[in-house]
Amino acid sequence: MKIYTKSIFIPFFLSCFLLFCAFFTRYSTTFDEMVCLRFNEALVQKGTARLSVGEVLRRLRVLQAELADHDQEQVERSSLDAVIAELVNETLINHKDKGVRAYTACCLADILRLCAPDAPYTPSQLNSIFELFVSQLKGLTGPEMPYYAQAFYLLESLSQVKSIVLMADLSNGHVLTIELFRVFFEIATPEQPRNVIISMVDILAQLIDESVMLPSKVIDMIFSQFTGLGSKTSHPFTLKIERPPAYIMAKQLCNICAERLQRYVCQYFTDIVFEANRSIDENFQVELDEVMLQDVEKAHRLVYELYVASPPILENVMPQLEQELMAENVTFRLLSTSTISEMLSVKEQKIDFTKEYPSLWKSWLSRGNDKSPVIRIKCYSTEVMATVVEGILAKYVDVDEKVRMTVCKMLGSLDYCTVREKIPSNVLDVLSDRSKDRKQVVRIEAMHCLGKLYNMAYNDISLIFLSLENLNATTEWFSLIPSRILHTIYINDKEINILLESMIPKEEKLLFFLSLFRLLAIKYQRQGRCAII
């Protein structure tokens, strides 16, 4: 099938292939001559002869049935000239009868299909044609609507032939594009058949791809499907929300046209944040006014919703979130920290956040040391840490040694308070297991990480020498790091033994083993056993 496209460059080999396919299609299957359109009745009143509405409707039905029955390149082009001229007549396009307009639209869609990729109309005529098309597509509200079948036929034709791309270059193209988006989002209801939704998404995606610049109202309509879901307090990010069909359409558009929509998302976010920054000027202690704060919160809520729906669309926004994490103003740091925390809390991640945005991930982790306690709490909320820990456990056993090594390095980069208070002992158990990894690079990174953690925890561990009071499970785990490292001796691997030797400086070996024996003795005492110290 020939379709409409605005693409100018086609590779030479593809051009040859398409020409061959066209030649093969035309001449290899049949040697019959091209057929001529049999319809030869007038559609427009000529002279004094008057045509009743019923008669015009009958003729349009006959014509539409014959046009629909023909395939592309099957009809002699010259035999269509008469109906091509009559169908664009204002008396048909602007007829007061709904049926006449409905069948006229179907006939015009068939003409565009049969003549593709060269529309036989002037830009002025195409303006009128697409105004008719958009008005007829409003009839897709429900199957009970009059001439619903004709509206659906028009929808399918625009989707399959891609004739909708002609609208992008028209003088009233922007107005028609805005109206078409508005109509489609309004008629997207739970009762709408799935094939109707699919065709509508396809048509809108074609317009997004082919438009040089999308109207701002179109962007607002797409984004409003995400920001109109209610606040994050009324819809917690851990709760599964029933999404309306309009949201599903917007989500599909964002995934299909992610590259084209990236700049619009970035511009939207940048404009709001820039305006907010300008309002506080150089005084970072000034709080945003209520209206401005609502706009900034709405922008961050949009970023979160888009991350859930289509992460690639945020490619240019993520660096801005990272800049906000380092902002002087507490409001911006809190909003960005909260937004990223909720991104990390998404149960079904479409991407590996830590792998896709390593710099942003590290910056977010650093907010655990923020001077503002509110931000520190938000950074390591229960929901966030549960998701992060789950991801860490999964990556520790990844098939790729580079991933296992990176996770060890990431855990070693955390500050002591974060590890002690937020990382459960089962994660640390898995870390110690990596010191026995089959790959040398992972073993080295795991042992370095264990050594660093033990060094940071040494002051707390020393309390064990002074008191037999119970410490938290994680601190007690730190105290057994030397024992866990020594367990690697039982593997009886030469490389591991050499690595173990290098972990303990010669001048500190005696102190190391004395500390270890002391810790083991205390452990036995706690268990009610005797120990010789």
Image (cartoon, grey):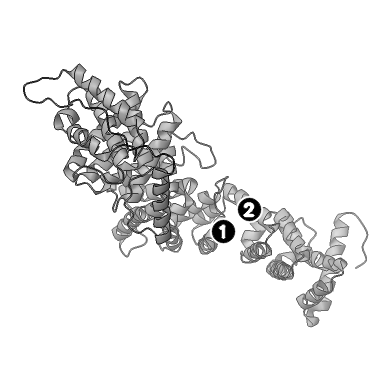
Extreme residue toward the bottom, this view: 507
| 398 versus 508 height, above or below | above
**Which amino acid type corresponds to the residue marked 1 in the rendered image?**
Thr
**Which amino acid type corresponds to the residue marked 2 in the rendered image?**
Gly
Q: Visible in this render: residue 312?
A: yes
* Nearer the observer, 72 or 137: 72
* Nearer the observer, 467 or 52: 52
Q: Position of residue 483 (x, y in %)?
A: 82, 65
337 relative to 159 in the view: left or right: right
Cα distance, mark 2 to mark 1?
Answer: 10 Å
Query: The C terminus appears in which quarter of the rendering?
Result: bottom right
Q: Which residue is mark 1?
A: 354
Query: The N terminus appears in which quarter of the rendering?
Result: top left
**Label whose residue precedes the other's in the sequence (2 or 1):** 1
Query: Is disc 1 placed on a helix, strand or loop?
Result: helix
Point out which mark residue 391 bears. 2
| 169 versus 429 height, above or below | above
Count of picture labels: 2
60 relative to 476 in the view: left or right: left
Q: Are marks 2 and 1 in contact (CB under 8 Å)?
A: yes
Q: Position of residue 130 (x, y in %)?
A: 24, 38
Rendered residue at 36%/44% (across/down)? 2
Query: Is disc 2 placed on a helix, strand or loop?
Result: helix
Rendered residue at 58%/47% (across/down)? 383
Q: Quadrant of residue 203?
A: top left
Q: Position of residue 239 (x, y in %)?
A: 53, 38
118 relative to 239 in the view: left or right: left
| 249 versus 415 height, above or below | above
Q: Visible in this render: residue 518?
A: no
Q: Quadrant of residue 323?
A: bottom left
